[in-house]
Amino acid sequence: MEVSGHIAELGAGTTSRWQVGDAICALLAGGGYAEYCVVPEGQCLPVPAGISLRQAAAVPEAAITVWANLFEPRRLFAGNRFLVQGGSSGIGTMAIQIARAFGARVATTAGTYGKCSFCLDLGAEAAINYRTQDWTAELAHWSSPTASMPSSIWSEATIFPSTSICWPRAPAGAHRLLPRQPGDG
């Protein structure tokens, strides 16, 4: 269903912005495994700068899925807290970035500390390792911090043991805090 490549030919009478040779990606109803395929011009997207054609093939599915679920109709607004389950997946990575671009506060789950770190780099405020942490408790804490956990911003992406959450980077001058310990509330 997803394709990317260079336009080989334009249909008769086409007056689009596309030209032969343009690098595009698209989401199709079918036929994407063929060497050549026909794509309605309205389904074509330019290949984003800095990514390969191979990588670009994944963009339309993820972008359209996230957009349709968050903004058609509009469900996400600046300042909303937003949980992305599986933040290191294709749709998860797109959701983190789009939600942040629209001003939402994002928390995510992932299955390893490396994936948590990756999600933080994409813009998530909090990334919870669901294999080693009680993600529901961590998420509740993130969404309603208590006096036992100062609401300061963390100074760097630090991944703590299973008794805490993976915390994000902060601007220069922010304080580094110790991880929450069992029984802290």
Image (cartoon, rainbow, N blue to C red):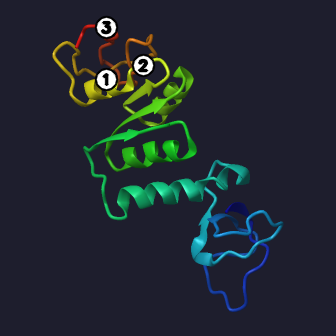
Q: Residue at x 41, y 57 (%)?
A: 69
The secondary structure type at the circle numbered 1 is helix
Q: As rendered, which of 150 and 109 lies closer to the eye?
A: 109
Q: CA distance from mark 1 to mark 2?
A: 9 Å
Please, which residue is most extreme toward the right here?
35
Q: Is residue 23 above or below residue 152?
A: below
> Label 2 sits on what residue type?
Gln
> Quick check: 8 left or right of 58?
right
What is the total number of numbered labels drawn onto the structure image?
Answer: 3
The answer to which image quadrant residue 164 occupies is top left
Q: In the rendered structure, which disc, 2 or 3, sits on the residue that comes first in sequence?
A: 2
Whole-percent x, y for residue 70 in the image: 37, 55
> Label 1 sits on what residue type?
Ala
Q: In the rendered structure, which disc, 1 or 3, sits on the residue that comes first in sequence?
A: 1
Q: Residue at x 58, y 59 (%)?
A: 60
Quarter holding the C terminus? top left
Q: Is residue 114 above or below residue 80?
A: above
Whole-percent x, y for residue 41 in the image: 62, 77
Whole-percent x, y for residue 83 in the image: 37, 39
The residue identified by callout 3 is 182
Q: CA distance from mark 2 to mark 3?
A: 11 Å
The residue identified by callout 2 is 133
Q: CA distance from mark 1 to mark 3?
A: 11 Å
> Label 3 sits on what residue type?
Pro
Q: Are marks 2 and 3 in contact (CB under 8 Å)?
A: no
Q: As rendered, which of 25 and 68 lies closer to the eye?
A: 68
Mark 1, other Cα within 10 Å: few <14 / some 14–19 / many ≥20:
few
Q: Residue at x 38, y 47 (%)?
A: 99
The residue identified by callout 1 is 137
Q: Are marks 1 and 2 in contact (CB under 8 Å)?
A: yes
Mark 2, other Cα within 10 Å: few <14 / some 14–19 / many ≥20:
some
